[in-house]
Image (spheres, grey):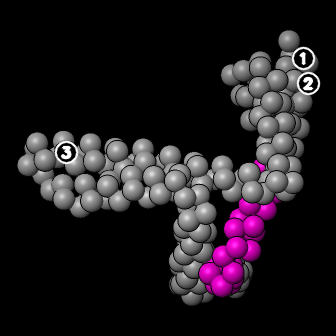
Amino acid sequence: MTMVLPQIARRSSNWWALALRGVAGILLGLLAFRMPEITITALVTVFGLYAIIDGIFAIVAALRGLRELDRWGWMIVEGVVSVLAGLTALAMPLLGALVLTWIVALWALVTGAFEIGAAFRLRKMIEGEWLLMLVGFLSMALGFFIIARPGVGLTVIVTWIGAYALVAGVVTLVLAFRVRKWANEHA
């Protein structure tokens, strides 16, 4: 930490920018806990906009590939599907929230399966591989839980985002004041 602090302070004497980031994180965390529906709406909106932009870039890349006689068919299909998914998420936010929930559930299942597989492979190389296996089982349990109860799963996702934002905000705010102190001592 002592090595990182001088680098941050040298690059920017704007400790207040770090402090504002910290405060924004804290506010986002509190907002996610206090008004989860707004957080869900924001997540779906970001997902929708991302899918549209990603789809447009895929279509552009496919059309450029068409000019150069490259294979482009699947990429244009991907782009169109992505744009339609984004538009659907923006037009029907409840459906977008459900899709986002399913994506997180599938991610947890796949990640968990890979972690369990990695734990089996690491058994001969390291001690404590059971910890990775435990994390894999927990990840898969989360995935199955979200699939079984997607409404509750969405609330869990928002709660995690809120907890992360709150903790990251506090840590960033503490860092901002440490940078300010360091900058004042070395001014």
Q: Is residue 44 left or right of residue 163?
A: left
Residue behind mark 1: 184
Q: Amino acid at mark 3?
A: Leu
- Who comes first in sequence, dot 3 or dot 2? 3
Q: Amino acid at mark 1?
A: Asn
* Residue 125 locus on image (x, y percent): 59, 81
Q: In which image quadrant can residue 78 be found?
A: bottom left
Range drawn in magenta: 141-165
For mark 1, does the 10 Å Cα neighbourhood hold few (<14), some (14 to 19), or many (20 or more) residues?
Answer: few
- Above or below for 143 versus 77: below
Q: CA distance from mark 3 to mark 2?
A: 54 Å
- Above or below for 90 versus 11: below
For mark 3, does the 10 Å Cα neighbourhood hold few (<14), some (14 to 19), or many (20 or more) residues?
Answer: some
Disc assigned to residue 63: 3
Instruction: State the residue at coordinates (91%, 18%).
Output: 185
Could you tell me if residue 176 is visible in this image? Answer: yes
The quarter in which the C terminus is drawn is top right
Could you tell me if residue 164 is visible in this image? Answer: no
* Residue 131 locus on image (x, y percent): 72, 80
